[in-house]
Amino acid sequence: MPQPRTPHPAALQPSIQLIKQVLTDALCLLLPIQCAICAVPDTRLCRPCEVQLEAVGDSGESFESPVDLDFPVYAAASYEGITRTALLSFKENSAPYLKRVLGAMLARAIDEALRIHSGMTLHCVPVPSATEAVAKRGYRHVELLLAAQHPRPEIYRWLVARRERADQVGLTSVQRRQNARNSFRVTARVGSRVSVREQNDSRPLAGKHVLLVDDIVTTGASLTAAAKALEDAGARVVAAVTVAHTPRIFA
């Protein structure tokens, strides 16, 4: 008795695509979605917006450090236009699916920093958000951008937020520095990732070179506070990278 022939995978492809489309259409009826950038319906990120974001971050952009920073900052784009809309949606509107395209932009800034500061091992340390912000968002947004990259860089969680702080939006540069001061500390768990003589060593990060990672730099207040906590623990902050920078502070 002849055995039934198994269809070739290529022959099943149209059927699989049709099923996916039917399921997607049904889901859109039950849970309407729209592009996080332009609000076109039935997609979380439309292809034109995706292409535009990819074009914005095609080349890394380096720029001078803000006042009071002792290390350079590298960013992929200016915080304006579609980049600003995407980052706001990613952070404020719980749109974690933007991690891939924004993570790719951050990766270009990281590559730029690694190229310029070659010859040393740099540890990627994300600047942490306040606990309240993480709980509201549902994810650690900077770590999500790092985790979305290929190859994925190793993430060193050496910083934690020491306290809740006021929203930085609308604050002057002086107010931002005051608001960010002493807002980070080196985690006690650093001993599990770094070889130290004593668990209570006052400089557990001695000899470590750090690449600080954040989503946006405006006045540099958060980066300054994060760098101070790391340097007090013995590390040297070599540079910082961000997806975007606010251009007006670099005039």
Image (cartoon, helix red, strand yellow):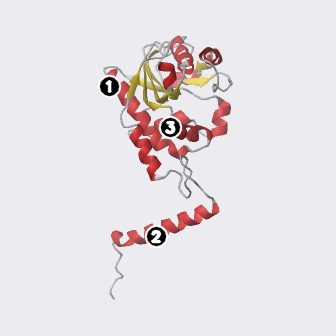
How many numbered badges does the structure rendering display? 3
In the image, is residue 24 above or below residue 153?
Answer: below
What secondary structure is found at the residue carrying circle 2?
helix
Dot 1 corresponds to which residue? 115
208 displayed left or right of 217: left
For badge 3, the amino acid type reads Gly
* Residue 18 marker: 2
Q: CA distance from mark 2 to mark 3?
A: 36 Å
Tell me what residue is drawn at x 61 percent, y 14 percent: 174
At x 60%, y 29%, the residue is: 129
Q: Residues within 10 Å of mark 2 (few under 14, many from 20)?
A: few
Numbered tag placed on residue 81 in the rendering: 3
Count residues near mark 1 (Cα–Cα under 10 Å), then give few for <14, some for 14-19, many for 20+.
Answer: few
- Amino acid type assigned to the residue bearing label 2 in the image: Leu
Instruction: Answer above or below: position of 236 versus 216.
Output: above
Q: Residues within 10 Å of mark 3 (few under 14, many from 20)?
A: few
Q: Kindly report which numbered mark, 1 or 3, lies closer to the viewer in this rendering.
A: 3
Residue closest to the eye, 212 or 245: 245
Q: Is residue 152 visible?
A: no
